[in-house]
Image (cartoon, helix red, strand yellow):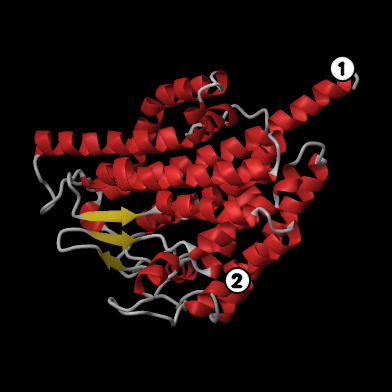
Amino acid sequence: MTPALAHTTTTTTANRLLSIDALRGLVMLFMLLDHVRETFLLHRQVSDPMDITVTEPALFVSRTLAHLCAPVFVLLTGLSAYLFGEKYAGKGDVSGFLFKRGLFLLVLEFTLVNFAWTFQLPPTVIYLQVIWAIGLSMIALSALVWLPRQVLLGLSLLIIVGHNLLDPLHFPDGTALHVPWAILHDRGWIELSDTLRLRTSYPVLPWIGVIGLGYAIGPWFARGAAPAARQRKLAGWASFGLIGFVALRLLNGYGERPWTAGEAPLHTLMSFFNITKYPPSLLFLALTLSLGLLLLLTFERLQKHKAIGPLSVLGSAPMFFYLLHLYALKGLYVLAVALFGLNQGDYFGFDGIWAIWLTAGVLAVALYPAVRRFASLKAQRRDIAWLKYF
């Protein structure tokens, strides 16, 4: 390889990975915004889908932005798993790493993550949320990676497109299928004892389809893959997904609850984009994954933009940022109650959405140096095995 070609190949690889980290960093900022809302707007919680008759547009937009987080992050988890296998020995290493990291995430969900949300020891409720879903999806993918790529792609799309057919199935508490179905598809409660119960906030079946899809598109980002061809595929799949979303939404049929015309055009638009996350409906995933692919395409084309660097730093240490921001928010909430009391009924809370955005921006800036230092340590100390799990 000539020096010029080697430089071009290295640059292309760096750009390819930088865009992935930048997208991950962006959606984590959206996550931060939503978690600030959940922390300081407890007195104005939204339903799923949102009740647009009582949800103001600014709150609707803030919550809707957060819809991008889980689908994009799970898709990129599958994509990163493929790139991990390309970097190391192949599917055997990928399968082993996915299984171990999936177990690691499950332990985190039951311990550090749940404590950050509840501040209860011992807990009376454990919320099985996004880290739980990613962990189980990684364990599932550790087996699915052995399938031929086209089979995995077809199976993943079948899950994403077809899982809403299972919506009518429900199994009451006490029946044999209640627990596995609550984990897979039917959001609900699992009673472990008189003092402890689990809430399956993120039913995992659709997320297995998303992580499988991310792994299946991995060859688009492989070494030697032409950037122009990759960008055409990103644009093509995103366009197809968006067209499919609009077409099915207009039909008001399969894949989402019906939308209705409102008193004003804005309320009609809000109803049109008011989609279901728990579990993610077909149209939820069609919209969010398509937008995610477009954002990935945009970041790849804007490599020299000054915002790419900070976003890629946040995206290169996602679990560290996730845990750090949860404990920072809990600490701020406890401090706010201590200083100002309970000024919104039983909760301390902000009066306007602008305060949510301002707090999220200040927190992002404040937490960035610690994330940057951890990301640097993670890149430099590859001999420390546990760092790669963050």
Residue at 76%, 53% (x, y): give it: 233
Q: Can you say which quadrant of the picture contains the N terminus?
A: top right
Is the residue 4 above or below the residue 277 in the image?
above
The residue beneath circle 2 is 161
Is the residue 249 above or below the residue 317 in the image?
below
23 sits to left or right of 182: right
Q: Which mark is residue 373?
A: none
Helix, strand or loop at label 2? It is helix
State which tag comes first along the sequence, 1 or 2.
1
Residue 352 is at least partly visible in this image: no
The residue beneath circle 1 is 3
- Which image quadrant is residue 43 in? bottom left
Image x and y of residue 143, in percent: 60, 55
Kind of residue at badge 2: Val
Q: Residue 291 versus residue 170: which sits nearer the camera? A: 170
Kind of residue at badge 1: Pro
Residue 172 is at least partly visible in this image: yes
User: Are there few (<14), some (14-19), or many (20+) residues within 10 Å of tag 2?
Assistant: some
Q: Residue 174 versus residue 324: which sits nearer the camera? A: 174
Is the residue 140 above or below the residue 297 in the image?
below
Image x and y of residue 58, in percent: 37, 54
Image x and y of residue 72, in percent: 55, 50
User: Are there few (<14), some (14-19), or many (20+) residues within 10 Å of tag 1?
Assistant: few
